[in-house]
Image (cartoon, grey):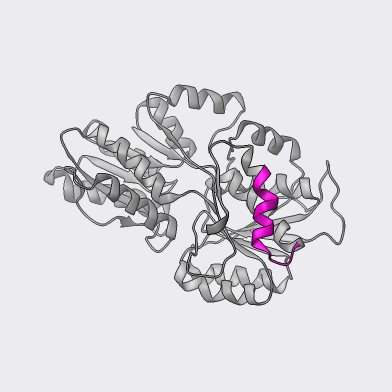
Amino acid sequence: MIKWKNAGILSIATALIATGLAGCSSNNNSSSGAGNSANSTPANAPTYELITNGQSPFWEAARLGMVAAGNALHVNTDMDEPSPSTNDVQVTMFKDAVAKQVAGIGMSSVNPAAITGTINSAIASKIPVISFDSDAPQSNRLAYIGTNNFKAGQILGNYVKTLFPNGGKLVGFVGTMSQQNAIDRYNGLLAALKGTNITFVAPPYLDQQDKNVAQTNVQNAITRYQSQGLNGLVGLYSYDGPAIIDALHQLNLRSKFKVICFDGDPQTLKGLADGDVDCTVVQKPYYFGYLSVMLLNYLHQDGNNIDAAFKSIAPEIAKHKSMKIFPSKHIIDTGVTLVTPANAAQFLAALKAKNITST
């Protein structure tokens, strides 16, 4: 697993808040200490732990947001990235966090149904638990922060219809279909494409967040379905876009397929500029980390009173036009951006101006 703690990078994070964009750097094995050079954290400050659903450059942006919130609040923060990406590993991380007596836990669930009991047990013990990125909607988690993935799938699907005016045959690629975000993205795509001549010729290929398997899956799908008219490849997770790009380069088949992605992996963004990607839907993982820590801190201070916590965080959400808060549903929708050849140059220029390589 990878563990991240506050690293005294408030100046970088503050710049990212100002732009509403979040960047990634390459994965390291650890980051140094919990102390902050800009803002000292009291020795008795609470600790909030975020547990991702796997290891990916995608989570570096969330880590930056987490650290920024920790510095602003003078609290400790910690991030665990499970490897392998399984429910068992997440449960172990979750129980370790409880044993450390953390003040709150944020979770992007690998298997929402399987981890529901673990979440409910913590809630019963008065430990605030929220979801981010991949929800556990059947649990007693107090809130969800992240993308409305069904809507994101619909947004992508509506653009996909413009790519295939005469119909298309698609295959999707994803880590696992047990995660709520994958389920919702795929179902959103299906809803947008209903009634058209654009169809998925097979269920999504699963790679269990193994990048080598992801690329092999693309190659296998092309081998099996190209003769049946396959002409669209859909990467549902951040690393699946690069897997598609690499496979098409190796097979010299880019001109035969439309490449449709989720997230702004550095290679996916470069692919937009180079003509290797036709579109991607970009999330805001920076705010997954930032808002999770903020909301957990409100919950910790007010005895898990989610209504009071949502009222407290509402002014922060109001600063961002693309974000929406749904207090009655205990959801904060951080919004998405559709990046296509029409707006790619502007989008990439904005990233480059801030020395950001991914979002």
Magenta residues, dominant SS class: helix
**Picture quadrant of residue 272:** top left
Of all residues, the one furthest to the front in this rendering is 328
User: Residue 138: x, y in percent?
Assistant: 47, 69
Q: Taking the image as drawn, is residue 252 in sight?
A: no
Question: Compared to 278, does 51 lie above or below?
Answer: below
Q: Is residue 281 left or right of residue 43?
A: left
- Residue sitting at 55 percent across and 70 percent down? 140
Of all residues, the one furthest to the left in this rendering is 228
* Camera-nearest residue between 297 and 212: 297
**Picture quadrant of residue 162:** top left
* Camera-nearest residue between 325 and 224: 325
Magenta stretch? Answer: 302-315
User: Residue 102: x, y in percent?
Assistant: 72, 66
Quarter the N terminus occupies: bottom right
Numbered circles on residues, count: 0
Question: Compared to 72, does 139 lie above or below?
Answer: below
Q: Is 159 part of what is drawn in magenta?
A: no
* Camera-nearest residue between 292 and 5: 292
- Residue sitting at 77 percent across and 46 percent down? 71
Q: Is 309 part of what is drawn in magenta?
A: yes
User: Residue 26: x, y in percent?
Assistant: 58, 42
Q: Is residue 228 left or right of residue 359?
A: left
- Residue sitting at 66 percent across and 32 percent down? 18
Question: Compared to 18, does 36 lie above or below?
Answer: below
* Camera-nearest residue between 89 and 220: 89
Q: Taking the image as drawn, is residue 91 in sight?
A: yes
